[in-house]
Image: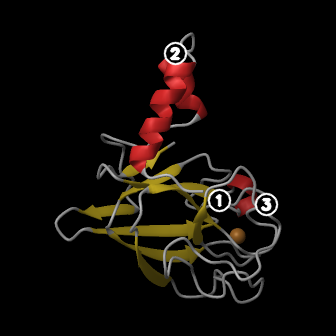
Amino acid sequence: MRFGAASISAIFTIALAACGDHSAGDAADASPALTEGSLPTPAWLDVDENGRTVTIDLTAGLTATNQLWNFNGFAGGEATLVVPEDFTVTINFDSLDPANSHSVAVLPVSDSFPPTFRDPEPVFRGAMSADATSITEAQSADDPTQSFSFRASRAGRYALVCLVPAHAFTGMWIGFEVSASGASGLRN
Ligand SMILES: [Cu+2]
């Protein structure tokens, strides 16, 4: 079940009303509202407000975090990339991991991802790197950077997930939020 930003606000209001002795901060921690306002923009994220495009240079195995099974050094949902709704997003995807291939796809966010993905469908059409579930054919350190684009057509909370077996299961994912407010940046 998916909620639009308006229904999330409505649910929030009801939840706050129902838990009068909890602070708004507690409620926000349990179910953060979609981002409004500004966030830091790392060098690997470029947002063109006029062209309504976002370009993300995403590198698997950029740091040693999570035994290299990370995106730009982040794993286990510890960071969330925020892009504005209806912008066209291009991901330039590369890997520095000499041992394993990696992939990336936009999936619904989850507390836990399965060890394997069968016929995965990205949330947005085209929001998946090539041969995403293949141990041998996904992006390796020897491959040139691959690029793919999609339209972030629906606000909500999603995740950038590696679909190579066992990778997401062991933490190779970060948050991906499409903001209705036009907010962008990295929250971590
Ligand atoms: Cu991976």
Q: Which residue is mark 2?
A: 23
Residue kind at label 1, given as amino acid type: Trp
Sequence-wise, the earlier of marks 2 and 3 is 2
Whole-number angstrom distance, CA of label 1 to CA of label 3: 9 Å
Quick one: label 3, few (<14), some, or many (20+) residues within 10 Å? some
Q: Position of residue 154 (x, y in %)?
A: 41, 63
Quick one: label 2, few (<14), some, or many (20+) residues within 10 Å? few
Q: Which residue is mark 3?
A: 169
Q: Which residue is mark 1?
A: 173
Q: Which mark is residue 70?
A: none
Sequence-wise, the earlier of marks 1 and 2 is 2
For image coordinates 56% across by 36% down, the residue present is 31
Left or right, residue 137 beside residue 144: right
For image coordinates 44% across by 45% down, the residue present is 7
Residue kind at label 2, given as amino acid type: Ser
Is the residue at mark 3 in contact range of ligand 1, meaning its CB lies under 8 Å from it?
no
Q: Give the number of callouts.
A: 3
Q: Secondary structure at mark 2?
A: loop
Left or right, residue 97 beside residue 42: right
Q: Quadrant of residue 18?
A: top right
Q: Quadrant of residue 103?
A: bottom right
Mark 2 and mark 3 residues within 8 Å of each other at the beta carbon: no
For this orientation, the residue located farthest to the top is 21
